[in-house]
Image: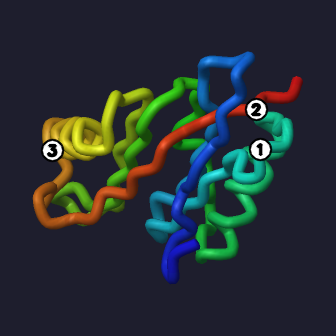
């Protein structure tokens, strides 16, 4: 966990599944976000991930936490949290990248192309997504 935001983390690998699992919720008004993920290699449902992401987003000051991203792609994930030119909070994310560097570069590019400002000077949160999905 980070001081201001809960940092997304690692969704653990299962030899049976070749995909990852993570859910991100964010609040456009406050800039808070939370991510639900499998961090203990126990079988985990998307509902469990979702509940955790919502709770963390609210704990960090989110007022209207809505789903930002949900995926089951295996690989590197990235999230950037900045602003648009008009001052609104703006999130950009991506998943399934082959390396940490590629994830950071591609998410910065998407953020900038979609109207995010100051892309080069904002922290990009990255993590590797594994999975042990439970139905």
Indicate the quadrant where residue 72 lies: top right
Q: Are marks 1 and 3 in contact (CB under 8 Å)?
A: no
Label 2: few (<14), some (14–19) or many (≥20) C-alpha neighbours in 10 Å? many
Cα separation, mark 1 vs mark 2, equals 6 Å
Secondary structure under the numbered disc 3 in the rendered image: helix
Specify which label sits upstream in the sequence, 3 or 2.
3
Which of the labelled discs sits on residue 111, or is there none? none
Label 1: few (<14), some (14–19) or many (≥20) C-alpha neighbours in 10 Å? some
The residue that mark 2 highlights is: 132
The residue that mark 1 highlights is: 41
Residue located at (49% from left, 79% from top): 4
Q: Which residue is the extreme one toward the front? A: 15
In-front residue for pair 13/4: 13
Split into 4 quadrants, where in the image is the C terminus? top right
Foreground disc of the pair 1, 3: 1
Residue located at (62% from left, 40% from top): 22
Give the x, y percent position of residue 50: 74, 45
Foreground disc of the pair 3, 2: 2
Q: Which residue is the extreme one toward the bottom? A: 3
Visual colour scheme? rainbow
Q: In this picture, is 78 found above or below 86?
A: above
Secondary structure under the numbered disc 1 in the rendered image: loop
Indicate the quadrant where residue 92 lies: top left
Q: Are marks 1 and 2 in contact (CB under 8 Å)?
A: yes
The answer to whether 7 appears left or right of 85 in the picture is: right
Q: In this picture, is 32 found above or below 3?
A: above
Specify which label sits upstream in the sequence, 1 or 3.
1
Which of the labelled discs sits on residue 112, or is there none? 3
Specify which label sits upstream in the sequence, 1 or 2.
1
Give the x, y percent position of residue 23: 63, 42
């Amino acid at each position: 966990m980070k001081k201001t935001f809960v940092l997304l983390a690692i969704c653990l690998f299962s030899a049976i599944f070749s995909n990852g699992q993570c859910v991100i919720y964010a609040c456009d008004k406050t800039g808070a976000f939370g991510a639900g993920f499998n961090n203990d290699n126990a079988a985990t449902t998307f509902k469990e991930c979702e509940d955790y992401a919502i709770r963390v987003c609210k704990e960090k000051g989110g007022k209207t936490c809505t789903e930002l991203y949900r995926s089951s792609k295996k690989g590197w994930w990235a999230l950037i949290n900045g602003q648009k030119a008009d001052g609104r909070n703006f999130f950009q994310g991506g998943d399934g990248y082959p390396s940490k560097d590629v994830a950071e570069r591609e998410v910065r590019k998407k953020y900038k192309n979609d109207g995010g400002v100051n892309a080069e000077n904002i922290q990009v949160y990255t993590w590797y997504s594994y999975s042990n999905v439970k139905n």
